[in-house]
């Protein structure tokens, strides 16, 4: 599964668990409008660390926080590339 | 009335059935200790000494403790896993002037302790074996994991305050403990065996669990004690049916409903009791209704000499079983101004019952909200596919920390099935815990590690 598909699948799973209404997952979706709260994002980062083997936010100090879904995907793709 | 020593107790219980201390490779009849010694004629030299009891084997340790109570001024009980690098500090702090060991002590010479005595499981007649009259200080190490362990001062009186010998002795009882008898939980069982009735089967850290269980079966162990972690290992062992105890006791960690229920299925004939005790605070209470937690009425009146209260969230105990102080470091007293020792074990009252939720120092902060790892583990362990779990913090860029769970399953699960189980476990937690307490991630691991004191190793703490 690609990084993007993994992220989208985890987001749907977490939304279901946390009983959150998830906005349609388009590239330009602003994450703060996605329906996720802080805890949902915290869980997402933890799950992705297990799935992709990387937490880009604590790995490097200069990682900027992503604004849109495509920013988020790119952050993980870049970090996964560094690890690989 | 002068303090009775352990030898006095042996004298008083000499009549009746034969009683034994069974080690892994040797055994000793307790009656032989009444006019014999395991210390090779050196018992008299230890009169009034401060003795480091540093044996490899638990049998030789037990013999030494029985012989030196009332004779030595102070005994320091080193468990099998005691880290040798702490010896110089311990010897200096406690004023050690003798070492009793069951091994060659030449490598200990540089420590500068004047007297070295060898203990063997062979009892030789010894005219010097008169019961001593001193009030010997018993020094136990706390089971903390880092740095030099603290030394806690007890006496035979404080150690035995919760032991009420039965009116009619019953030497058919065979005690056994998975603990090392040089730790509080195990020492309680050694003392119970000596003061009360019956024989005792000792454990050995190097012995595989299956061989240990076979040995317990061969000796006909009736009263068996250990931590929930010890008992989970029994539940996982194909040799669990090698023994058939009538009494099963859990202490030292939180006994959750899953481990109690599983033990009931494994040993349907056994009375299953969980108890609270700590090295510093002594014995608090026991719970015999086969349910996790403790009735509020037991906290109000535990039915022993202890007074209990929950204050500022933690259990506090005032009893004759309290240790008096820490040794060294200004000899800090253990009890607060109110006479109670704070156990730092946190409890919550729900529907008339108190439940342990974790240690005060182990709270995880998830976005400003508190989580006790143990309360999450208790829920996860209720899932029928789960053997045991360890919940620990993981740093997180959004909330500072989240809790994640390492889970050992009863049977290996892979692929699709594992994903389904992971979802079930998260679902179970969501149904019973606040959102921030639900593990953000669940990993299946083949095993978890245990510390030498028989508790889940919490490396993150």
Image (cartoon, rainbow, N blue to C red):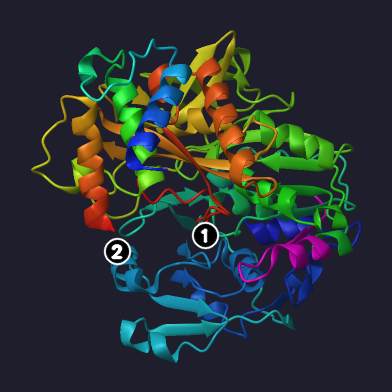
Subunit bearing disc 1: B
Residue B213 magenta-highlighted: yes
* Front one among B146 and B334: B146
Residue found at the far left of this picture = A62
Instruction: Identify residue for label 2.
Output: B93
Q: Comparing marks 1 and 2, which lies closer to the viewer?
A: 1
The disc label shown at residue B452, or none: 1
* Front one among B131 and B141: B141
* Front one among B359 and B171: B359
Label 1 with label 2: CB-CB less than 8 Å: no
Judged left or right of residue B164, residue B166 is: right
Cα distance, mark 1 to mark 2?
24 Å
Q: Please state, as top left, top right, bottom left or bottom right, where the C terminus of chain A lies in the image.
A: bottom left
Residue B441 x %, y %: 43, 36
Q: Is residue B51 above or below residue B381?
A: below
Q: Please state, as top left, top right, bottom left or bottom right, where the N terminus of chain A lies in the image.
A: top left
What residue sits 42% from the left and 48% below the top?
A: B458
Subunit bearing disc 2: B
Residue B97 x %, y %: 38, 75
Q: Is residue B51 above or below residue B425?
A: below
What residue sits 71% from the left and 62% below the top?
A: B209
- Residue stretch in magenta: B197-215
What residue sits 59% from the left and 9% below the top?
A: B352
Q: Is residue A32 visible?
A: yes
Q: First in sequence, mark 1 or 2: give its number.
A: 2
* Front one among B248 and B461: B461
Residue B137 x %, y %: 47, 56
Q: Quadrant of residue B216?
A: bottom right
């Amino acid at each position: 599964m690609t990084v993007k598909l993994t992220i989208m699948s985890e987001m749907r799973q977490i939304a279901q668990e946390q009983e959150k209404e998830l906005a349609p997952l388009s590239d330009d979706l602003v994450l703060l409008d996605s329906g996720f709260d802080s805890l949902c994002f915290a869980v997402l980062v933890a799950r992705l660390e297990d799935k992709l083997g990387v937490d880009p936010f604590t790995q490097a100090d200069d990682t900027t926080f992503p604004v849109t879904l495509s920013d988020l995907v790119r952050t993980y793709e870049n970090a996964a590339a560094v690890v690989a | 009335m002068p303090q009775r020593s352990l030898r006095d107790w042996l004298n008083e219980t000499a009549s009746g059935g034969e009683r034994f201390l069974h080690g892994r490779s040797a055994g000793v009849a307790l009656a032989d200790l009444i006019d014999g010694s395991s210390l090779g004629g050196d018992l008299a030299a230890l009169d009034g000494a401060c003795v480091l009891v540093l044996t490899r084997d638990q049998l030789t340790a037990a013999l030494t403790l029985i012989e030196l109570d009332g004779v030595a001024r102070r005994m320091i009980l080193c468990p099998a896993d005691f880290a040798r690098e702490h010896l110089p500090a311990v010897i200096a702090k406690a004023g050690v002037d003798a070492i009793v060991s069951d091994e060659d002590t030449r490598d200990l010479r540089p420590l500068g302790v004047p007297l070295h005595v060898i203990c063997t499981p062979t009892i030789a007649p010894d005219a010097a074996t008169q019961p001593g009259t001193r009030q010997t200080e018993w020094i136990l190490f706390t089971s903390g994991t880092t740095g030099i362990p603290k030394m806690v001062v007890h006496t035979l009186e404080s150690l035995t305050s919760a032991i009420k010998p039965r009116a009619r002795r019953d030497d058919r009882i065979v005690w056994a403990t998975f603990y090392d008898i040089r730790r509080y939980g195990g020492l309680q069982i050694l003392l119970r065996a000596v003061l009360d009735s019956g024989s005792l089967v000792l454990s050995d850290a190097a012995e595989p669990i299956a061989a240990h269980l076979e040995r317990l079966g061969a000796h006909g162990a009736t009263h068996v004690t250990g931590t929930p972690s010890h008992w989970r290992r029994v539940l996982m062992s194909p040799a669990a049916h090698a023994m058939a105890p009538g009494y099963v006791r859990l202490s030292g960690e939180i006994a959750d409903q899953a481990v109690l229920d599983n033990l009931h299925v494994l040993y349907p004939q056994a009375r299953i009791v969980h108890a609270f005790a700590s090295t510093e605070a002594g014995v608090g209470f026991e719970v015999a209704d086969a349910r996790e937690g403790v009735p509020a009425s037991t906290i109000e009146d535990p039915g022993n000499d202890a007074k209990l209260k929950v204050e500022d969230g933690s259990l506090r105990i005032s009893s004759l079983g309290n240790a008096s102080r820490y040794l060294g470091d200004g000899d800090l007293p253990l009890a607060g101004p109110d006479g109670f020792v704070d156990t730092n074990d946190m409890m919550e009252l729900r529907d008339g019952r108190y439940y342990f939720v974790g240690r005060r120092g182990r709270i995880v902060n998830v976005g400003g909200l508190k989580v006790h790892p143990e309360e999450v583990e208790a829920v996860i362990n209720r899932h029928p596919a789960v053997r045991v779990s360890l919940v620990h913090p993981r740093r997180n860029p959004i909330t500072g920390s989240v809790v994640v769970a390492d889970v050992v399953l009863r049977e290996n699960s892979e692929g699709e099935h594992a994903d389904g189980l992971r979802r079930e476990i998260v679902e179970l937690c969501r149904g019973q815990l606040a959102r921030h307490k639900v593990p953000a991630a669940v990993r299946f691991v083949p095993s978890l590690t245990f510390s030498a004191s028989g508790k889940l190793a919490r490396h993150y703490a």
